[in-house]
Image: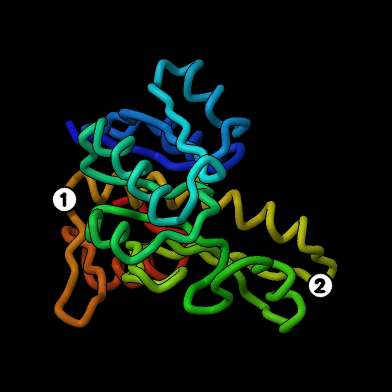
Amino acid sequence: MRNLVILISGRGSNMEAIVRAAIPGARVAAVISNRPEAAGLEFARRHGIATAVVDHKAHSSREAFEVALAAAIDAFAPDLVVLAGFMRVLGEAFVRRYEGRMLNIHPSLLPAFPGLHTHERALQEGCRVHGATVHFVTPALDHGPIVVQAAVPVLPDDTPETLAARVLAQEHRIYPQAVRWFVEDRLRLTADGRVVLQGVSASAQESAFVWPPLEA
């Protein structure tokens, strides 16, 4: 059984999707937030999942906060740390601590539009396609080996809100699947920093990594 520790800052809808997926071989050991008022904590409690709060405002520096956060995470012996709307930039020492076993989801087709306000920026740039990316976390913000991406069309009458909703629906598909692949030990990093999904044909793998993924 692989232990998952999920970090959230708000509602945690991707956390909810992972919990509801009931991934075989995985156990959500804890949900941790940097905000005491995060709505996702109540969802976790209702589902019998341990919760913890490490309030970044209670610490004098980012380094001190990250030391406390790491201690809270490690108390649950995680095999995988899952960032699900965790709205804190993490320092290099923290990231290196969980290197190769920490995933993030970002609401754009990385490397396009790292950072915030991705949907507004996609509309401003006239993108015809937008989407979401699950990637391994590296010290560079919203950067790292890509596990899976899902694309959605940008419609002529889209607003940031309608586009965000369409992307979020895909996030809820691909994040549980990426976690499942990790739990099944099917993700391999190549020497040049790419992710290879074990156990599917090359053509299926291409589809899985570019468009909404095939069941595999």
Give left or right: position of 194 versus 123.
left
Binning the other alpha carbons within 10 Å of mark 1 as few (below 14), some (14 to 19) or many (20 upward) gives few
Q: Position of residue 14 (x, y in %)?
A: 51, 43
Q: Residue at x 42, y 32 (%)?
A: 31
Q: Residue at x 54, y 66 (%)?
A: 151
Give left or right: position of 61 versus 200.
right
Secondary structure beneath label 2: loop
Binning the other alpha carbons within 10 Å of mark 2 as few (below 14), some (14 to 19) or many (20 upward) gives few
Secondary structure beneath label 1: loop
Disc on the earlier residue, 1 or 2: 2
Instruction: Identify the amino acid type marked 2.
Output: Pro
Give left or right: position of 160 versus 94.
right
**Residue furthest front in the image:** 60
Residue sitting nearer the eye, 196 or 94: 94
User: In the drawing, what numbered circle is on residue 156?
Assistant: 2
Height in image: 146 above or below 80? below
Instruction: Identify the amino acid type marked 1.
Output: Asp
Q: Residue at x 46, y 37 (%)?
A: 54
Q: Residue at x 48, y 61 (%)?
A: 89
Task: Determine which residue is flagged by label 1.
Answer: 185
* Residue 104, quarter of picture: bottom left
Distance from the alpha carbon under mark 1 to that under mark 2: 41 Å
Q: Position of residue 106 (x, y in %)?
A: 51, 61
Q: Nearer the viewer, mark 1 or mark 2?
A: 1
Height in image: 173 above or below 52? below
Is the N terminus in the top left, top right, bottom left or bottom right quadrant? Answer: top left
* Residue 97, quarter of picture: bottom left
* Residue 131, quarter of picture: bottom right
Q: Position of residue 86 (x, y in %)?
A: 51, 49
